[in-house]
Amino acid sequence: MVNVKEIRANRKFGPGYFIREQMEMREWTQDDLSSVTGFTVKHLNKVLQDKQPLSLEMARVLGEVFNTTAQYWINIDTGYRLWLEQEKTKAEIEADIKGLIYERMPIKDMLAKGWLEHFASASELKEQVLRFWNWDVLDFSVLDKQLAPWLSRKSESFNQFNASYAYTWYQMARKVANEITVHTYNRDHLQSIFNRIHVFSSKERGVEQFLTELNNSGVKFFILPHLQKTYLDGAAFYSNENPVIVYTARYRRLDNFWFTVAHEIAHILLHLDNETMFILDNLKDGERDEMEDEANELAAEKLRHPEIFNYLTPYLNYLSASKVKECAAHYQVHPSIVIGKLAHDDHISYKNLSLFNENVLDKIPDKYKIK
């Protein structure tokens, strides 16, 4: 049975179209029509462009002039105004849909990154969004339910707004991870290379070698740039039976790479389970979280941070580059890790990193980089 409420008027021509048709049959100009009807040319021009509804008086006059009924013109005008109102409602609905999507997803940034294709209408955008989330209907309350437990233990940077943006990034990361194949996950192998992560950092091609070993342990790794209004450095989650580590390269310093990867490995070993399915490191500087603190502590341990601090404490007031290199060689870590540790704790300035400043992206093979 047809739902009468869902019946929409087909596209209508306004009365102006039919008035012009009558004028052409009679070869009348607007001046001629003005003379016959008594209405001004200015007033008739608005009617001919359908910018002004017909009054009962004008419908009566048109009926007399063109040998029709007044009701004929009223019906045309009413049908046209109904169609306009329906079209206006459709536009408003599309605007609401577009506004809702833009509120919950950083669409401009996703377009710039090529995660979405450019669209001509809100309906086209909606179809892409549905495919992105694998939804049948547009319902962001699904995200709210999934994010609720996560939001309850996060800091002020995790309000519904930017948490939704972070989760959008996570959804993209999941899509990428599903396309990557690595070995079966071996926790013992991961623990072994984690114990030696500081040694990898000191090698000439240590970044590439470590990522190879990471894949061999059954951990998927790739770089996915962060989205606007998020503070993501990395993430850890499971893709089927394999753990995943994602690095955003928000900071491209070598020391940041090593600490972020160590941090995410700590999450995999300590925190990921059936209750904690994913961890997005989206904290602002200075914010605290219990699981983040635990991961930081373990990452710092593996990168020899306590030993570095103890070794260099006597020299902090007059720290030289040679002493940094000496410490790095002694503990088999890259000098940038030494500087990064001391700078993070405000013992020295991050400006000192310029001595060992290397863009980690230059050391990571392109196969790990997602555009």
Image (cartoon, helix red, strand yellow):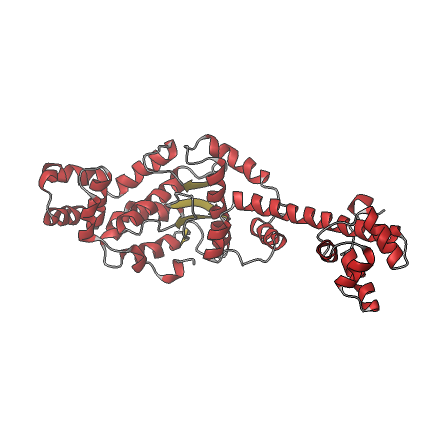
Where residue 318 appears, x then y in whole percent? Answer: 9, 41
- Would residue 140 be visible to someone looking at this image? yes
* 288 and 192: which is toward the camera: 288
Where residue 187 appears, x then y in whole percent? Answer: 39, 45
Residue displayed at 44% across by 39% down: 272
Where residue 245 appears, x then y in whole percent? Answer: 40, 48
Q: Is residue 139 above or below residue 87?
A: above
Q: Is residue 29 above or below residue 148?
A: below
Left or right of 124 on screen, residue 24: right
- Would residue 181 be visible to someone looking at this image? no
* 350 and 323: which is toward the camera: 350
Left or right of 200 on screen, residue 97: right
Residue displayed at 39% across by 43% down: 231
Where residue 149 appears, x then y in whole percent? Answer: 50, 32
* 327 and 112: which is toward the camera: 112
* 19 and 261: which is toward the camera: 19
Left or right of 311 on screen, residue 22: right
Question: Which image quarter: residue 41?
Answer: bottom right
Position of the C terminus, as image quadrant, is bottom left
Q: How many marks?
A: 0
Left or right of 55 on screen, residue 314: left
Residue displayed at 20% across by 40% down: 342
